[in-house]
Image (cartoon, rainbow, N blue to C red):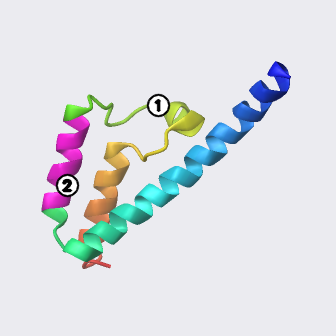
Amino acid sequence: ILIVFWLYTLVITPVSAAFGRQREAEADRFGLQLTAAPEAFRRMLIKAAQVNKMDPDPPRWMVLKGWSHPPIRERLAAVDAWKKAGGR
């Protein structure tokens, strides 16, 4: 039973994390559209990363292994892209 559970977790965790990262990216876009304040959002992301002592650019394998949020550097790039696209 433990081996089956371990295999299940080994497969499901990255899939679940990918879904979570996608939902977080959607939430970021929604927040940007709602507030139209990309600089404030950017400052909030940086502050959260500092407070939580997050690696701004972790190895890709770590992210794929199970992170439920996009790395801060990706989120900041999304804010910049949103701003560059004129808020869309």
Q: Residue at x 52, y 51 (%)?
A: 20
Give the mark nearest the N terminus, 2 or 1. 2
Residue that carries the numbered disc 2 in the rendered image:
42
How far across and down, in percent of the image, does residue 28 sit? 34, 62
Drawn side of residue 48 relative to residue 12, left or right? left
Q: Residue at x 51, y 57 (%)?
A: 22
Foreground tag (2 vs 1): 2
Drawn side of residue 80 relative to residue 15, left or right? left
- For the question of whether residue 84 can be seen, the reply is no
- For the question of whether residue 12 can be seen, the reply is yes
Pick the quarter of the image with the C terminus. bottom left
How far across and down, in percent of the image, does residue 83 sit? 23, 70
Find out whether residue 74 is within the magenta segment: no
Classed neighbour count for the residue bearing mark 2: other residues with Cα under 10 Å, few (<14), some (14–19), many (≥20):
some
How far across and down, in percent of the image, does residue 72 sit? 32, 44
**Which amino acid, by three-letter code, is at mark 2?**
Arg
- The range drawn in magenta is 40-50
| Relative vertical location of residue 53 with respect to residue 39 in this rendering, above or below | above
Q: Residue at x 19, y 55 (%)?
A: 42
Report which quarter residue 14 is drawn in: top right
For the residues marked 2 and 1, what is the alpha-carbon distance in whole angstroms? 22 Å
Residue that carries the numbered disc 1 in the rendered image:
59
